[in-house]
Image: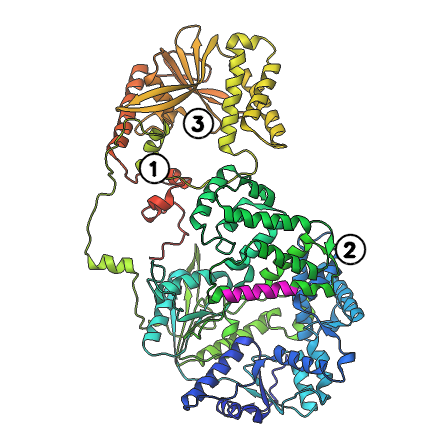
Amino acid sequence: MTDGAEFPDVQKRELLSRLAEGHAARMVVLTPNQRLAHELAREFHEAQSAKGLIAWETPDVMPFRAFVERLYEDALYSDAAPRLPLLLTSVQEWELWQTAIRASEWGGMLLSLPSTAEDCRRAWELAHEWDIAGALGTLPGNEDARAFAEWAKSYARRCDKDGNVDSSRLPDVVAPLLGEAALAKPELLIAYGYDIVPPQVRNFFDACQRHGIAVHRCAAQPREGRVCRLAFASAREELEAVAHWARARLEAGAKRVGVVVPELGQRRKEVARVFARVMDPGHNLPGSGQTAPPFNISLGAPLADYALARTALGVLELATGEMPFEQASRLIRSPFVGGAAAEFSVRSLLDVMLRRKAPALVTLGKLVALIDGAPALRRQLETLFALARECAGGERSPHDWGRHFSAFLEAAGFPGERSLDSGEFQTLAKFNEALAGLAKLERVAPRMSCTRALARLRHICAATLFQPETPDAPIQVLGVLESAGLEFDALWVSGLSDEAWPLPTRLNPFIPPAVQRRAGIPEASAQATLARGRRITDGWFAAANEVVVSHPLMEKDRSLLASPLISSIPPGTPETAVHARYRDLIFAARRIETLADGRALALPTKNPRGGTRILSDQAACPFRAFARHRLGAEGLEEPAAGPDARVRGQLLHTLMKELWGELKGSDGLREDCGPAIERAADAAVAAAKLEQPFAALERKRLAKLAREWLEVERARHAFEVVATEEKRKLTVAGLELNGRIDRMDRLASGGHVLIDYKTGRPTPNDWLGERPEDPQLPLYALNAKEDIAVVAFAKLKTGAMRYMGFSEGKEVIPGVKSAVDWDALIASWRKELESLGSGFAAGDARVDPKNVLKTCRYCDLQPLCRVYERVNALGDDQEDGDG
C-alpha cells in the first residue's frame, strides 16, 4: 500500500488562493469521491463571497474518475481516436459479465445471475484499482475465485475483440495518452483528501509527472477541538440525541454541522424521519409548508424506490405481463397515471371494488375488463392495451424496446397532468437517463425479448442511487467513509460500538485472500482495517472545534461496549437542547379536557344490519362492533391466489346444503353416497363460479372432505336433517337480527341438534363465561321454537373431523359433552347475550379488546381505534408515531 508521501504538500490556504486565480492557474484538484469535491468547491465559493465578490470562475475540482473520463473524451477528438477503444457504460459492463457467466459451466448453477454479474463488476474494479488483475487465477483459491478468473478472461476477450474498455481499466488506457498535444492537460494536479492512494491512481499520477504535470497533495487543515464521548441505552435514543444536538448547534450559530451514522443505507428512512421531526415538529401536519429541511442525507436511495419511477416500471410490467394486485392497486391510485387528478376519489373507490373482484395476479386485459366508473383510466389502459398487443412477441433491439417503453408510458398518460415538483422533475429526468441506458445495451446485446429488456431496465433503476438536488443544507448526515476529509464547525460520530468500529474485515469472495492481503487492500486484513480505522478516527478528532463520539449500550438483548478506538476518551454530557414533540408540549401545559369517548348515541333502530356478527364483534371489542356495524368501517380486502377463506367457507356450506338436501338424514347414509357427493361438489364449485384450474382442485378437495365427514356422521344415532342454511329472525335485548342456521337435525330419540360448520380450531369453551366468543349457536338456541337438545360445532378439518359442543343428555352425539346443568347453561347464555345486545344498542363503543394481543392481532380496524398507542399489540420493536 502506498500513500504518495513523496508528493509535495500544499497547505489548504494556499490551495484556495490558487483556485481564486481561475483557469490561469492551470490547476486541477482531484478528490477520491464526488462529495469531497462538492464540499471543497462549496468552501471556495463561500470564501470568494466573503471577499465581497459577485462573480468568479468556477474552480476545476472533480473526482479522479471524472478527470480521467474528461481526458479520454479529449483524446476521442484527437489523432489518437482511431486507436482508442470505446468506453462501456456500467450497464453494458454488467450485461457483458452476464454473458460471460451464462456461457460458463457455472452459468446454470447460480440462483441470481444478475447479482453475481454485479459482484463481478465490483471485483474487477477492485482488482484493477489495486493492480492485482494479473494475479487472478495464478494462486490457488476457492471455487468462487476459480470461476471469477475464468469469467474475467472471457469478459476481457470479448471487450478486446469488440474494441471496448470499461471504466475500471480506463486510467491505464488514458495514462499513455498524456503526451498527446490535443489533450487539455493542467500544469498542476492537487490530490486533495486522499487517505490512501491506490496503486492504479498512484501509477496515473506517476505518468502525469513523467509528462510534465506536477502532482501535489493537500488535506484539510487540522483543528484542535474538544472531544467528548457519550453512551446511550439504544441506537434509537442515540439518534434522537444526535438530532436534538444538531438543531441546538444550528441555533447557536454553527454554519456546518456534521453527523456520521454507520450503516446509513439501512437506517436512511429512520434518520430522515427522526431529523425531520426534530428540525420541524409540524412538518407532517396538514397545511404545513414544503420548505427544504436544514439537513441533507448524503446517501441516495435506489431510483426504483421513488414513486414516479416505481409507477413507470409498474406501467411497463402491466403492459407486458401480469403483476400482483397490490402493485396494480398502486398504479390505479398513482398521481402519475393520466387523469389521476380529475378521478382521484373515483379511483380510490374503484380500488376498493377491485379488491373484492380481482384475482391475486392481474393482467392488463383483466384489469381493463374490471374497471367500472373511471372512464379516463379505462381509456388510458385501453390505449396501452392496444399498443402492447402490437408490440407483443419476438425479439427487438434494446433501442427499439426503449422507444416502445416510452410509447407505453405515453399511452398511460405518464407522468400525469399536474405540474411536477422539483424532486419529481429530477426523478423523471433520471428515469429517462435509465431508458437511454437501456437503449445503449444494443452495442453489446443486439436483440432481446421484452421480458429481458424490462428486467434490464428494472436493474438499471435498482442499481442507480439517486437523490434530487436541493439547496445546500447546514447539517450533513454522512456514512462513515464519506466523512473522511471533511471539515465542520461541530461533528457528532454515532454508533461507534466495539462491533461496528473499526469496520469488520470484508474480503472479496472472487479474489484469493492472499492476493488481497498482499496488495494491502484495507478491508482484506484486520491489521489494515484497524490502521485505516485509526486514521479516520484521528481525522474526525481534527475535523471540527467540537467533536462528539457515541455508541449504544444495547442492541436488542446484546450488550455493547465502546470501540477501542474511542474508549480512552473520557465520558461527558454535551449541552443539548431537547425539543419536545407537539403532543408532549400540549401534555406539559396541563390544559387537558377529559372526554368519555367510549359511549356513542343509542342505536336509533331495532333492526341493525350485521346479523349475529354484531354480538361476536361486541364480545371481542365494543369498539369493533360500533365501527363495523354503525360507522360502516371495514378493512380493505386483499385478493388471494385462488379461493380465499370467505370463498372456501361458501364452498363448504353449499357442499353440505346440497349433500344433505339429497341424503336427508342417517337413512341416506346406508346407500352408496359417491354420486351424491360428486353432485354436491359440482354444485358448490358452480355456485362459487371458480375458474380453472382452481375449480378442478376444489371439486376434488370437497369430495374428499365430504367422504371423510360422512364417516363421522355414520357413527351417530338415527337422525333427520330438517333445515339447512335456513334464515331466521332472532331477537336479543330488543334487537331483531337476521341469522342463518347452518343445519338442524331432529333426533330419533327426541329433541333437535343445532350445528355450525367450522374448518378452523373451534372450542365450545368459547361459549362459557363473560363475553362469549362465537355466540351464534347460543343465540339460535335461545330463539328456536324447537326443543334444542344439542348445540355443536361440526369440525370439518381433514384428519381431525369431529363433533364438539354441549348436550342436554349423555352420549347423544359422539364427541359432544353432556352439560352439567343444561338449564343453567341456557340461562347464562341468555344473560350474556342480553348484556352484549343491550350494550350495543346503548352505544357502548369502548376500545376494550377481550384478549388484548389475540383479539387485536388480526383486527382490520387498528388504524381507526389506535389501540397500539395504549397497548403495543404489534410488538415492542415497532416505531411509535411521529407526534
Asked whether 379 or 351 is in front, the reply is: 379
Q: Which residue is mark 1?
A: 624
**Residue 152 % position (x, y):** 74, 66
State the residue at coordinates (75%, 80%).
81
Please name the residue that numbered disc 2 is placed on.
105
Image coords of residue 880 (percent x, y): 37, 54
Q: Which quarter of the rendered picture does the C terminus lie within?
A: bottom left
Q: Amino acid at mark 2?
A: Glu
Q: SS at mark 2?
A: loop
In-front residue for pair 36/261? 36
Q: In this view of the protein, can residue 222 be seen by the observer? A: no
Q: Which stretch is magenta?
A: 425-437
**Where is residue 430, by image quadrant?**
bottom right
In the picture, which quadrant includes the N terminus? Answer: bottom right
Total numbered labels: 3
The residue carrying mark 3 is: 762
